[in-house]
Image (tube, rainbow, N blue to C red):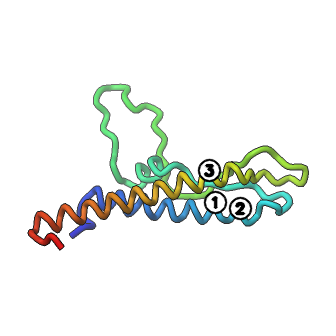
Amino acid sequence: MFEKLEITRMAQALAAHSGARLATIAQNVANADTPQYRAMDLPEFSKVYEGQGGLQLRSTRPGHLIGAERLSSVTPVKSGGAMAPNGNDVSLDLQMMKSIETRQSHEMALAVYRTTSAIIRTSLGRNG
């Protein structure tokens, strides 16, 4: 029943994306001292979700949305800080900021899912 609601599908996709991004960030932190290691990240959730068929944008006039990028898969992309002498570009400060942002996205997805569940339970007369 919940899978058919667009908001719950989006919240589930955001939670999954946040988990995958956090795993990528953890891998970056674990390799912070590895020579020649390049930091990775995932594309923004909005671009990934749009590319997978969710929440399609509608053009309201000719020329609207020209050049909109669509991503068809979630593949890590290089994104690091300044290059260290050993060829490593992992910035621990940047990775910590990304992990906080990712945690907030995950918590938001769970809050949306919980709220949707509560609304549906209330509408069915099950307040418990």
Task: Name the side, left or right, on which 7 lies relative to 24.
Answer: left
Crowd tier of the residue under label 1, counting other residues whose Cα lies within 10 Å: few below 14, some 14–19, many 20 or above:
many
89 or 74, nearer to the observer: 89
Q: Earlier in the sequence, mark 3 or mark 2?
A: 2
Task: Look at 62% across and 54% down and name the residue there.
Answer: 41
Separation of residues labelled 1 and 2 (CA atoms)? 6 Å
Q: Secondary structure at mark 3?
A: helix
Find residue 12 and report its horizontal and vertical position in percent.
Answer: 38, 63
98 horizontally vs 108: left or right: right
Q: For residue 29, which numbered disc appears in the image?
A: 2
Residue in view at x 46 percent, y 54 percent: 105
The residue lying toward the viewer, choosing from 46 and 110, is 110
Secondary structure found at label 1: helix
Query: Which residue is nearer to you in this view: 56 or 112?
Result: 112
Q: Are circles 3 and 2 on residues that touch, CB within 8 Å? A: no
Picture disc at residue 25: 1
Report how far apart the C-alphas of labels 1 and 3 lie in the structure: 10 Å
Q: Are marks 1 and 2 in contact (CB under 8 Å)?
A: yes
| Amino acid of disc 1 | Ile
Residue closest to the far left? 125
Q: Is residue 14 above or below residue 63?
A: below
Q: Is 14 positioned to the left or the right of 115 in the image?
A: right
The residue that mark 3 highlights is 97
